[in-house]
Image (cartoon, grey):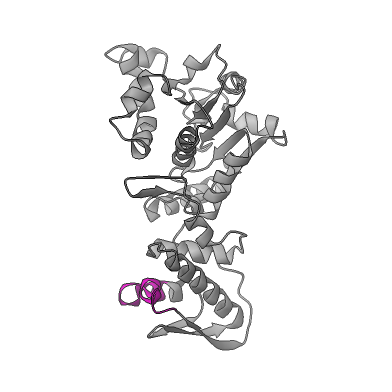
């Protein structure tokens, strides 16, 4: 479900009731939004009329919808009390979480900081992302499967940097398959490193968001941070490392087995991918698709499934993902 199209329960007849919520004057303006924009968004997403009178909100509508609105407003007030910015997307995420009756509150998300750099804090922004981050903490191997923009690689990278800063690991290893590592790669100009660099560029970009750019060359020269294609993992045992395999849908079953069996003592692995975007040539099977059937249920391995509701890029991205999912389901192609 797209972030700006929150889930709505099945409608049923309910008596119309009224209720009010008094906001603390110190947070009222942030909750209401500029010119009460957040109130209008909430009214559109919940089947109730909501009006602001100073720092008091008056809600009128079916009883269950009024209760839902009250819970959302209290979540937003708790977030504002923590000093967090309230945006239109925050309101939409809060409605989604309350509607789904999830165990986590949006205020909990605000407190789930992973790392902070130059005033920028990286934290999960949806309940699905929070569950994914918690799974990484609790398991040795975590698979993050979901659509583009759902934060699966970015959050894994943040957890890797956090683990390195806390001295829980001695190094970070970032890898991804180069699916065109055969003939097409041979026609590219430059050295082998220059040829494979475009495949690894997204990992470099994410790293630069979390570590001072001037420090990264030193970390790479010393081997504390390594960014390499998947083929370079063969024959190695990766001890005391936080290892991330990105774009895992483009591994073969054999490559996936090879990677997972590199796990050494004191290490943690995160495997990320989107099984709807497989670029393998011909009839090659995806290692990510196969491994779910092989390893599901194995202790200390977790499969985290992210969805379009966890997409935190432009809101249109979530709607695009959802439209493709619907199209593939109709054609019977949904994995």
Quadrant of the drawing holding the C terminus: top right
- Which of the 4 quarters of the picture holds residue 24? bottom left
Magenta span contains residue 34: yes
Compared with residue 54, is residue 237 higher up or lower down, i.e. above or below?
above
- Which of the 4 quarters of the picture holds residue 284? top right
Residue 1 in view in this figure: no
Compared with residue 254, is residue 273 higher up or lower down, i.e. above or below?
below
Range of magenta residues: 24-41
Compared with residue 188, is residue 9 higher up or lower down, i.e. above or below?
below
- Residue 135's spot in the image, x, y percent? 60, 42
Q: Left or right of 239: which side holds 35?
A: left
The residue located at (43%, 23%) in the rendering is: 224
Q: Left or right of 323: which side holds 15?
A: right
Q: Residue furthest front?
A: 167
Q: Left or right of 296: which side holds 72?
A: left
- Residue 162's spot in the image, x, y percent? 47, 38
Number of on-image labels: 0
- Residue 155's spot in the image, x, y percent? 47, 42
The residue nearer to you, when weighing 2 against 139, is 139
Residue 13 in view in this figure: yes
Magenta span contains residue 70: no
The residue located at (56%, 30%) in the rendering is: 269
The residue located at (46%, 71%) in the rendering is: 77
Q: Left or right of 179: which side holds 118?
A: left
Q: Report the predominant secondary structure element of the magenta stretch.
A: helix
- Residue 242's spot in the image, x, y percent? 52, 29
């Amino acid at each position: 479900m797209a972030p700006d199209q929150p889930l709505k329960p099945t409608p049923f007849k309910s008596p119309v009731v009224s209720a009010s919520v008094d906001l603390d004057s110190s947070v009222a303006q942030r909750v209401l939004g500029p010119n009460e924009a957040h109130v209008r968004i909430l009214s559109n997403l919940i089947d109730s009329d909501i009006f602001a009178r100073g720092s008091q909100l008056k809600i009128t509508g079916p009883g269950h919808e009024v209760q839902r609105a009250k819970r959302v407003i209290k979540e937003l007030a708790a977030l504002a009390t923590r000093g967090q910015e309230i945006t239109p997307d925050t309101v939409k995420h809060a409605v989604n979480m309350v509607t789904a009756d999830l165990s986590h509150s949006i205020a909990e998300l605000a407190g789930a900081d992973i790392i902070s750099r130059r005033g920028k804090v990286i934290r999960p922004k949806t309940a699905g992302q929070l569950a994914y981050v918690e799974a990484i903490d609790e398991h040795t191997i975590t698979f993050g499967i979901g659509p583009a923009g759902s934060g699966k690689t970015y959050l894994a990278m943040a957890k890797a940097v956090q683990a390195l800063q806390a001295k829980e690991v001695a190094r970070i290893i970032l890898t991804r398959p180069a699916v065109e590592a055969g003939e097409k790669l041979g026609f590219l100009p430059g050295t082998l490193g220059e040829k494979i660099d475009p495949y690894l560029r997204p990992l470099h970009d994410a790293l630069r968001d979390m570590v001072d750019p001037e420090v990264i060359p030193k970390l790479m020269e010393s081997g504390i941070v390594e960014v390499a294609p998947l083929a370079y993992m063969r024959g190695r045992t990766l001890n005391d490392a936080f290892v991330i395999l990105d774009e895992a849908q483009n591994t073969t079953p054999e490559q996936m087995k090879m990677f997972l069996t590199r796990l050494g003592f004191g290490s943690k692995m995160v495997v990320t991918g989107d099984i709807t975007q497989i670029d393998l040539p011909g009839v090659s099977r995806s290692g990510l698709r196969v491994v779910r059937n092989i390893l599901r249920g194995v202790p200390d391995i977790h499969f985290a499934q992210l969805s379009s509701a966890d997409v935190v890029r432009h809101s249109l991205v979530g709607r695009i993902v959802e439209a493709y999912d619907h199209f593939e389901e109709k054609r019977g192609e949904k994995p």
